[in-house]
Image: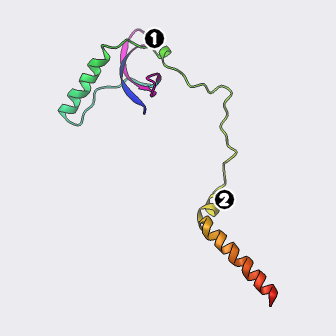
Amino acid sequence: MMTWNYRVFREANGDHIIREVFYAEDSSVVGCTENAVEPFGESLDELAKDIEWFKEALELPVLTLADIPRPSRKGQKRNRSKNVSRKQLVAELTKPPKSERSRRSANKCVLVASGRGK
């Protein structure tokens, strides 16, 4: 299960901001929000709790964007081999369930076979 918390970041210009940081099950950092976040709550109690979490971020080591792993897209191409046209999609969605198609196919074979016998 992925978890998250607030962390303080030192920006390239020296400013400090807070971002949400996301962690894998092994507690390794997997990403963060692109922009700074601000406290939020639908009630005063929720806002107070969010501010407490911001304060907890001040007790953790300060991060920079260099500490966040970047996904590697180099050499990766999107696999489009399974793309289908709208016409193919509609045809597939309107097909009867496989078990019913098998039954219908079997019935057609029987009808054709019995027709030949007459």
Location of residue 46 in the rendering, given as x and y in whole percent from the top left corner: 22, 32
| Residue in view at x 48 percent, y 19 percent | 68
What's the residue type where badge 2 is placed?
Answer: Gln
Q: In the image, which residues are magenta? A: 9-29
Q: How busy is the neighbourhood of tag 1: few (under 14 within 10 Å), some, or many (20 plus)?
A: few
State the residue position of label 1: 12
Q: Is residue 92 magenta?
A: no
Horizontal side of 47 relative to 65 (left or right) equals left
State the residue position of label 2: 88
Q: How busy is the neighbourhood of tag 2: few (under 14 within 10 Å), some, or many (20 plus)?
A: few
Q: Quadrant of residue 59?
A: top left
* Camera-nearest residue between 100 and 70: 100
Q: Quadrant of residue 21?
A: top left
Location of residue 50 in the rendering, given as x and y in whole percent from the top left corner: 26, 27
- Determine the CA span between mark 1 and mark 2: 50 Å
Q: Earlier in the sequence, mark 1 or mark 2?
A: 1
Q: How many marks?
A: 2
Q: Quadrant of residue 118?
A: bottom right
| Residue in view at x 56 percent, y 25 percent | 71
Quarter that holds the N terminus: top left
- Label 2: element kind: helix
Location of residue 64 in the rendering, given as x and y in whole percent from the top left corner: 44, 14
Residue that extends furthest to the bottom in the rendered view of this protein: 118
| Residue 95 seen in render | no
- Label 1: element kind: loop
| Residue in view at x 62 percent, y 27 percent | 73
What's the residue type where badge 1 is placed?
Answer: Ala
Q: How is the protein colored in the picture?
A: rainbow
